[in-house]
Image (cartoon, rainbow, N blue to C red):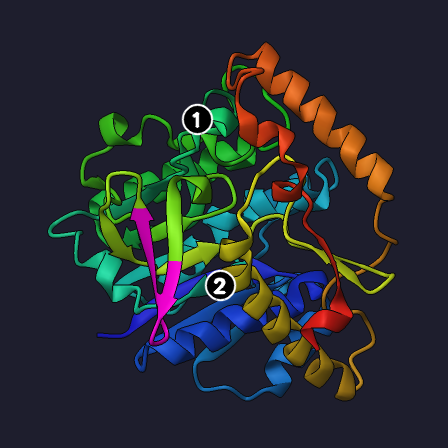
Amino acid sequence: MTLNFCTLFDSNYLSRGLALLQSLKTVSDNFHLYVGAFDDDCLAYLKSLNDKDLTAISLAEFENQPLLEVKKGRTPAEYCWTCTPFLIAYCIENYHLPSCIYLDADMIFYENPQILLSELNDASVLITEHRFTREYDVSETHGIYCVQFMYFKNDDKGLKALYWWRDRCLEWCFAYLEDGKFGDQKYLDDWTTRFEGVHVLKNPGGGLAPWNVQQYDVAEKEQEITITDKNGNHSRLVFFHFHGVKFYSDETVECCGALYGIDESAKKILYFPYFRDLLQIGDKVSMSGFPRNPHGAQNPSPAPEKILINYIRDVIFLIGKGKTSLFNGRIYNFSLHRHLYKLRQFK
């Protein structure tokens, strides 16, 4: 059975989107990735690949009048969020797909995602929890579930949830909290009771991210990455969500914001190989004459003093919210929160 995926990104995320595609090719021999290309340069490059596993979709193809009417009133990020359910629905309807899985473009697969879908049984929708580490838990404001890996079956139950979500995102989708809404994510909070046929992913190997990696020991042996929780339970890592990775114009890259504490071992196993892959992909893209930075680097990196000040501000906020305490030794170990690296060490 072919696994049908869709994602969306622009030229600033081109290297990340191509890394996602490359990872899928590594773990699966029967998939197709549909990409909503959010600018002409990105679209042209994707089409130039002539890749049998890839279909590039222009904005003009899936944008409809309702989307165009709200576009001017939303930031680029907010508009991408708004478009997510529209793109999923477009792929299902236009390509007559039996199901479609939405992926965030900044993810990498280490195992076949079919492992995760084996939980579905008769379910028509699959969603994934953030599973926040306690001190980073913002589910109350940003949502219990993460729009990162979502499965929709082309049946009555799957389409009912998808179309409802699409209508809500059209009505309101902004990067701030208002009346219990935040972006496209808070809408998912009650899906297990609002809709029938919704399954919440149980496998901890699906959905590792900077906001929950602290709960696991990450290890690699014979090209297999495993995660072990504090109770000693082992799982194979299926995908990691590299949210917050940012490239800067002064040849530096950041794993994520300073808020999240990440052990050096997790960086060496997950982030550093990712950076190397992105740089190799970026070099290939640039050699083709691509007119932009394929990593989205636009500004120089922040000064170390600014990073430290922002981190202190974040810690004060966490303490004030009761998410952590003054006696948590990890918050004083700034090395866990210093995530800025020179690119030359990954070349």
Residue type, mark 2 in image: Ile
Predominant secondary structure in magenta? strand
**What residue is drawn where x is 63% and y is 48%?**
244
**What residue is drawn where x is 55% and y is 57%?**
267
**Residue 273 horizontal/vertical position (percent):** 55, 70
Is residue 214 left or right of 37 when viewed as pictured? Answer: left
**Residue 197 horizontal/vertical position (percent):** 18, 40
Q: Nearer the viewer, residue 201 or 256?
A: 256
- Which residue range is magenta in the image? 219-228
SS at mark 1 in the image: helix
Q: Is residue 138 visible?
A: no
In the current view of this chain or complex, which residue is farthest to the left? 121
Q: Nearer the viewer, residue 52 or 148?
A: 148
Residues at badges 1 and 2 in contact (C-beta under 8 Å)?
Answer: no
**What residue is drawn where x is 69% and y is 85%?**
284
Name the mark on residue 283: none
Q: Nearer the viewer, residue 19 or 162?
A: 19
Q: Quadrant of the N terminus?
A: bottom left
Total marks shown come to 2
Is residue 157 left or right of 73 when viewed as pictured? Answer: left
Q: Name which of mark 1 and mark 2 comes first in the sequence.
A: 1
Mark 2 is surrounded, within 10 Å at the Cα level, by few (under 14), some (14 to 19) or many (20 or more) other residues, namely: some
SS at mark 2 in the image: helix
Q: Is residue 113 above or below residue 279?
A: above
C-alpha gap between disc 1 and disc 2: 23 Å
Residue 22 part of the magenta-drawn span: no
Q: Is residue 290 above or below residue 137?
A: below
Is residue 262 left or right of 312 when viewed as pictured? Answer: left
Q: Write down the residue under mark 1.
A: 134
Is residue 192 left or right of 12 when viewed as pictured? Answer: left
Mark 1 is surrounded, within 10 Å at the Cα level, by few (under 14), some (14 to 19) or many (20 or more) other residues, namely: some
Name the mark on residue 269: 2
